[in-house]
Image (cartoon, rainbow, N blue to C red):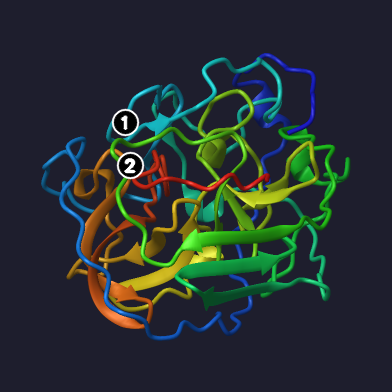
Amino acid sequence: MGTRVRIPRGPQLLMLCGLAIALSSCSPASQPSSSSSPTASPTSTPAYATSVTSSGPVNPAAIPLGDGYVSTTPKVGYVDACITHFPSTGGAQVDGPLINTTSHIGDSLTKLAVEGSVSWPSARYAVSESNGSRIIVGNDLPIDHTTGVFPIATSDPAYAYDRNPNRIEPQTINWSLRLNPVAAASPSCTPGGAIGILNDGVVLFNALDGEGRDAGANEILDSCGEHPDMDDELHHHEVPSCLLDQAVGRSTLVGYALDGYGIYVERNKNGSLLTNTDLDACHGRISRVLWNGKATVIYHYDATLEYPYTVGCFHGTPINASS
């Protein structure tokens, strides 16, 4: 995010704007197809995994706030961050209406969203396979939905909380990931930029905003959960509702992390998303999913409603997305 003046938080500032805009789902579109390849060998449970039992589904009206859950080692429910010092500017100016206490987020179904409906006809996103690699090319513009208007307009109710001054500009994505990724000797931290990409063609960042807080709670995003940073790079901090709503069945591949592992929307037998207690410190697990066109027992990351949302650390060895 760009540099902004930090306004002290306080209940009186939350009265600046009472309007809440319900998140709208995005228009569905066909996703890139995958071709068959040999079934990947299952990976063993990593040493840093925690064996736990699910405590039940997360209430979208009372999601635990992730502020402060930043670590320099893998920990369940934390972001293992490569950045160890965060400035006091770079995120939203004041607490938005989604935060109703210091420990919980309010009703995520009625979160305020940046206004606007901007189409991107030049958006490109393609996934292919070549010589044992998964090739991902695109320009970081959404292929199946519109975005809000950035910079955030002064007339937008979101401006009272988040004055994001950045624009959305095309980026160059040309990644070569392992088609069948393998676990690294030890997990690694997530950087401040891209940690992967979702199947809408927009890159994924970790769960932190520029100040090291829970970005999904503190920053005001558009109706498909995205916004540009100070380099004008559009990005998500989680798998947004417009993708979750399209993910049906027990498991759906919705993107790829930089270490080559898939990011899935996975549901239990009751149809609820998994929770942190179902996952290891990197926010993943081993289960049977559709991978490279075949049902495969393999490690993967899972989307959750609760922080850190997608990837807490890298289970495999990530590529350098900026190279």
Q: Residue at x 36, y 83 (%)?
A: 293
Q: Residue at x 17, y 37 (%)?
A: 47
Residue positioned most to the right: 154
In this picture, residue 231 sits left or right of residue 289: right
Of the numbered discs 1 and 2, the one sitting upstream in the chain is: 1
In this picture, residue 144 sits left or right of residue 169: left
Q: Is residue 4 above or below residue 208?
A: above
Mark 2 belongs to which amino acid? Cys
Asked if one can make out residue 262 in the rendered structure from this viewpoint, the answer is yes
Mark 1 belongs to which amino acid? Pro
Quarter location, residue 219:
top right
Residue 282, which numbered label? 2
Residue 74, which numbered label? 1
Q: Is residue 108 above or below residue 291?
A: above
What percent of the width, then of the height, locates residue 28? 59, 80
In this picture, residue 166 sits left or right of residue 254: right
Category of crowding for the residue at label 1, using alpha-carbon neighbours closer than 10 angstroms: few (below 14), some (14–19), many (at least 20): many
Quarter location, residue 38:
bottom left
Q: CA distance from mark 1 to mark 2?
A: 7 Å
* 155 or 84: nearer the viewer: 84
In this picture, residue 83 sits left or right of residue 68: right
